[in-house]
Image: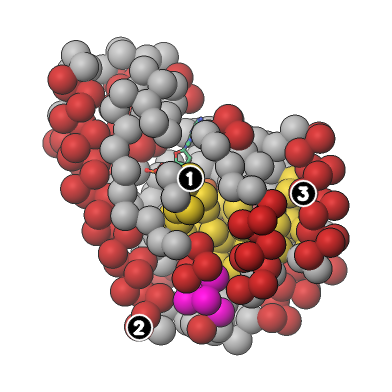
Amino acid sequence: MRIDLHAHSNASDGTDSPAELVAAALAAGLDVVALTDHDTVAGYGEATAALAGTGLTLVPGAELSCRVGEISMHLLAYLFDPAEPEFAAERDAVRGDRFRRGRAIVERCRELGAPISWEQVERIAGEGSVGRPHIASALVEAGVVATVSDAFTADWLANGGRADVRKHETDPVTAVRLVRAAGGVPVFAHPGAVKRGQTVSDQVIADLAAAGLAALEVDHMDHDEPTRAHLRGLAGELGLLVTGSSDYHGHRKTVRLGEWTTDPAVYEALVAQASGAKPITG
Ligand code: AMP
Ligand code: ZN
Ligand code: FE
Ligand code: FE
C-alpha cells in the first residue's frame, strides 16, 4: 500500500485540478491519497467524481492555517464532517481573510516595485483559496523572481518578509478541538519546517497532544534527518502517531506525489479515530 496523506489541488494553491490530482495519484502508483487544500473543502466533489472505477482511495481533508503568538503553523484535518457548522465557520473565516490579505500583499509588492496586479493574482488563483504561492506565481510571470520558491525570501513573501501580511489564523488548540468535534482527525503538518520561518516549541506540541492531536507529519521534504529523529522521539513520548507525505502542489513545488508516504498501520489507526467521514474508494 502506498499512502500519501497531504496533497493540494487548485481548490487552493496546487496547480492540478482535483480530477488531475486523482489521475496524478494513479500515475504515481498510490493506493491512497488525501486531498488537503488550505482552509477549504471545495475540491471534494470533483475529486470524488474522478475516482469512479479507478480503485484509488481518497481521504477527504484540509490543511488549516493556525498561529501561536507570531508563529504560523499548519494543521492537517482528515475525515471530518464538512457540514459541521463550527468548524465550517472557522474555515470560512480564514479563507475569507485570505482575500483582504492577498490584496494587501499585492499592494506591498507594487510599492516595492514589482509590476503585478490583483487581477493577475485572481486569474492565477481562479476559484482557489488565494495564498502567497499564487502571488509568487505572479512575481515569476512579471520577471521579478525566477521561481515560486525564490519569492519566499525576506525581500518578498517569506514570513516576516517585506511584502508579507498576516491573515487570520486559528489558535491550534482551538483548531484541534474543532476538528475532533467535527469527527475528524488532526495531524500537525511539517512541525519542524524551519526554512518557512520559526517553528513552535515542543511544549506547544505537548499542549496540542493533550488537546487531542493524533499525529505528527515527520517525513516531509522540509525536515532534515536530525529534525525527523527529534520529532519521532517526541511523538513516542507524547503517544502520537507519525505520518509521511509529499505536500504535493503540482508544478508550484518540486516534490513528487508519493515521494514521502505513510505506513499502512498508521493510516488504519488514523481512519479508526474518524467519525465525521470515511475514505472513499473508486
Ligand atoms: P499562505 O497560506 O498564503 O500563507 O501561503 C503558505 C504556503 O506558501 C505554504 O503552504 C507553502 O505552500 C508555501 N510556502 C511557504 N514557504 C515556502 C517556501 N519557503 N518555499 C516555497 N513555498 C513556500
Ligand atoms: Zn500550499
Ligand atoms: Fe503546510
Ligand atoms: Fe500543504
Label 1 neighbour load within 10 Å: few <14, some 14-19, many 20+ = few
Q: Which residue is mark 1?
A: 71
Name the residue furthest bottom. Answer: 275
Is residue 225 depicted above or below 280 in this figure? Answer: above
Q: CA distance from mark 1 to mark 2?
A: 27 Å
- Of labels 3 and 1, the one closer to you: 1
* Percent of width and height locating residue 194: 61, 34
Is residue 188 depicted above or below 196 in this figure? Answer: below
Circle number at residue 231 = 3
Amino acid at circle 1: Ile
Please report whichever mark, 3 or 1, sits nearer to the chain's N-terminal start: 1
Q: Which residues are magenta?
A: 176-180
Which quarter of the figure is the N terminus placed in? bottom right
Please tell me which residue lies in front, 241 or 134. Answer: 241
Q: CA distance from mark 3 to mark 1?
A: 18 Å
Q: Which residue is mark 2?
A: 85
* Percent of width and height locating residue 3: 73, 58
Name the residue rendered at 35%, 83% in the picture: 85
Circle number at residue 43 = none
Instruction: Look at the numbered disc 3 and say if its residue's Cβ is closer than 8 Å to ligand 3.
Output: no
Please report whichever mark, 1 or 2, sits nearer to the chain's N-terminal start: 1
Q: Quadrant of residue 14?
A: top left
* Percent of width and height locating residue 29: 73, 51
Q: CA distance from mark 3 to mark 2?
A: 33 Å
Q: Are marks 3 and 1 in contact (CB under 8 Å)?
A: no
Amino acid at circle 3: Leu
Name the residue rendered at 69%, 62% in the picture: 206
Amino acid at circle 2: Pro
